[in-house]
Image: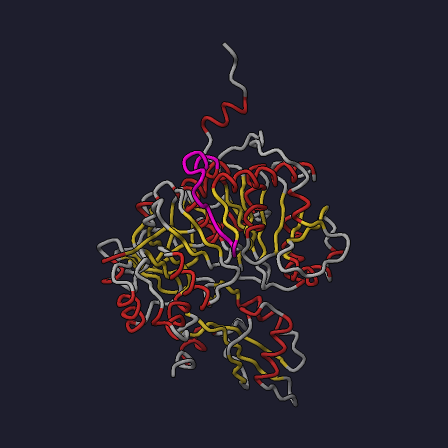
């Protein structure tokens, strides 16, 4: 009798991300796994091209534990690259395509990425900092839009042709090995790298049918960015259950409506702002939405009139909401159906594999109905912040992850989000650290002081607002400040309004009283 090898023993017991595709391929080889533009990939085709990618990456010297960055809009090459890395046990670091040169450099350097693939039209942005990215051994590009790329960049198509073998890579990968390194805005200017394991992803998918109503027959229109943990998780979970995903390059309202109508899409997931804006698309009433089964909403609560519009267009559609963060991979609560309809302000109950509680500042559970910090315990909780042991320890006590968010829980177990303990702004589905915007805007030549806060907004949930004090003798003009910001930071960080003050209120310690600004200007964006 032959002895079982270490790899065979590993394969028998492991639950890692790359194997989700292997198992779905065995069950649904001819079914479409995903489509992008006019190209459709069956599960068999998807798995084979991912394996070719993995073998090509091996020839480039990429091995288990190596970091590899990506800077691209949603596309098929992004997905193939990402899954190829996962099958090697390498760690993918997706970068928000709205970030600028200095922000990109920080992430690539901090993550110690050895490989960096960039969408062709974004190559000029990276080219400006390319020589300063000393740790990157290979630069590559996705030939997606036909843009001309200078020498010194490897075409992803050439990577795929380096190896014809479609055999599964023979790599021992443990459940607790890191799979992704996702950078999320912190309360300081420097973002934190959240290290998520294979088990963080696979364990939170076990109860997909219960927590997220996933079924094999689903056709999911994925328009949220794949650089977000939610985008990664949603695509991965639909693959795990043998569903079909349609990948949107960016959220295009007309294309969303046309694809939903034509492809009989059953699932949507995106910010409330998109649900609000889609009915304004010319010709909206001609589209058929009756195929929609589950629509996940994040951000602001849907206005009643918008809720009614969608219910009239798709009577059988179920609305769903979740609460979570990158550190939770990605959610810890869920609410849908009748519960959502009757409790639209709640973010739901704890998911099947999750415990959620409300703690005071001394880590004691508070009585029902009282406000405290939302804490959670789950197999989805991150491995930690990369190279940040102290910060990891700050949010982890006795197995509980401290979210930094304030909430309350009612007697039926429904969680209600109240506010952020951290000085963070949630705008249009993006997390923005106010300190990040303040640091950049402080360099504006006419500004002496600046405070950034998020104010209530019907579409964006929170609108980034800059309160500035001019340098004596200088005049600050709102339009000029906003234009300057557009040139110096990611577009989603740009303030929606600039308010000029003689002084910004401070406490005795010299810290800005942002709560005063939020209260005094809470109606700034109301019609």
Magenta residues span 22-38
Nearer the observer, 488 or 406: 488
| Looking at the image, residue 441 lies above or below residue 265 | below
Total count of labels: 0
Nearer the observer, 440 or 485: 485
Position of the C terminus by quadrant = bottom left
**Residue shown at the point (40%, 56%) measured from the top left:** 263
Most distant residue in the top direction? 1
The picture places residue 521, in percent across and down from the top left corner, at: 43, 80
The picture places residue 22, in percent across and down from the top left corner, at: 48, 35
The picture places residue 144, in percent across and down from the top left corner, at: 62, 56
**Residue shown at the point (51%, 17%) measured from the top left:** 4
Q: Is residue 200 left or right of residue 69?
A: left
**Residue shown at the point (30%, 67%) measured from the top left:** 310
**Residue shown at the point (50%, 26%) measured from the top left:** 10
Q: How is the image coloured?
A: secondary structure
Q: Is residue 101 left or right of residue 200?
A: right
Nearer the observer, 200 or 447: 200
Nearer the observer, 451 or 481: 481
Q: Residue 477 appears in which quarter of the rendering?
A: bottom right
The picture places residue 412, in percent across and down from the top left corner, at: 22, 54
Q: Residue 31 appears in which quarter of the rendering?
A: top left
Residue 118 located within the stretch drawn in magenta: no
């Amino acid at each position: 009798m032959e002895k079982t090898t270490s790899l065979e023993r590993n394969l028998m017991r492991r639950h890692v991300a790359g194997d989700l595709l292997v198992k779905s391929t065995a069950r649904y080889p001819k079914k479409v796994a995903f489509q992008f533009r006019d190209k459709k990939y069956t599960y068999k085709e998807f798995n084979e091209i991912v394996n070719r990618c993995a073998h090509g990456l091996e020839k480039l010297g990429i091995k288990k534990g190596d970091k590899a960055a990506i800077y691209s809009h949603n596309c098929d090459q992004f997905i193939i690259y990402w899954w190829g890395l996962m099958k090697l046990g390498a760690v993918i670091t997706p970068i928000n395509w709205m970030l600028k040169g200095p922000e990109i450099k920080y992430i690539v350097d901090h993550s110690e990425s050895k490989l960096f693939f960039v969408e062709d039209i974004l190559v000029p942005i990276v080219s400006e900092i390319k020589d300063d990215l000393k740790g990157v051994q290979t630069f590559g590009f996705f030939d997606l839009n036909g843009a001309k790329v200078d020498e010194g960049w490897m075409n992803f198509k050439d990577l795929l042709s380096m190896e014809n073998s479609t055999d599964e890579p023979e790599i021992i990968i443990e459940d607790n090995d890191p799979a992704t390194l996702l950078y999320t805005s912190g309360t300081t200017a420097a973002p934190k790298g959240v290290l998520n394991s294979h088990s963080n992803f696979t364990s939170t998918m076990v109860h997909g049918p219960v927590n997220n109503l996933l079924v094999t027959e689903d056709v999911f229109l994925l328009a949220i960015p794949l650089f977000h943990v939610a985008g990664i998780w949603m695509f991965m979970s639909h693959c795990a259950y043998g569903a079909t995903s349609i990948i949107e390059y960016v959220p295009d309202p007309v294309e969303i409506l046309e694809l939903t109508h034509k492809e009989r899409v059953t699932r949507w997931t995106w910010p409330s702002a998109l649900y609000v804006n889609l009915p304004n698309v010319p010709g909206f009433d001609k589209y058929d939405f009756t195929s929609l089964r589950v629509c996940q909403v994040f951000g602001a609560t849907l206005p009643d009139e918008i809720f009614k519009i969608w219910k009239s267009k798709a009577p059988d559609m179920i609305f769903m909401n979740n609460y979570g963060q990158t550190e939770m991979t990605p959610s810890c609560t869920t609410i849908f159906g009748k519960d959502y309809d009757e409790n639209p302000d709640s973010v739901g109950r704890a998911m099947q594999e999750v415990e959620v509680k409300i703690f005071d500042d001394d880590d004691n559970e508070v009585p029902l109905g009282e406000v405290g910090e939302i804490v959670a315990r789950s197999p989805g909780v991150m491995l930690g912040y990369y190279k940040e042991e102290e910060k990891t320890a700050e949010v982890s006590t006795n197995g509980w992850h401290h979210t930094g968010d304030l909430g309350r829980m009612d007697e039926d177990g429904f969680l209600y989000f109240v506010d952020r303990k951290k000085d963070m702004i949630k705008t249009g589905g993006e997390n923005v650290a106010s300190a990040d915007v303040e640091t950049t805007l402080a360099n504006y030549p006419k500004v002496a002081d600046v405070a950034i806060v998020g104010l209530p907004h019907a579409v964006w949930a929170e609108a980034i607002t800059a309160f500035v004090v001019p340098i004596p003798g200088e005049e600050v003009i709102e339009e000029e400040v906003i234009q300057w910001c557009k040139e110096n930071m990611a577009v989603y960080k740009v303030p929606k309004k600039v308010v000029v003050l003689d002084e910004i209120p401070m406490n005795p310690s010299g810290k800005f009283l942002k709560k005063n600004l939020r209260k005094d200007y809470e109606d700034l964006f109301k019609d």
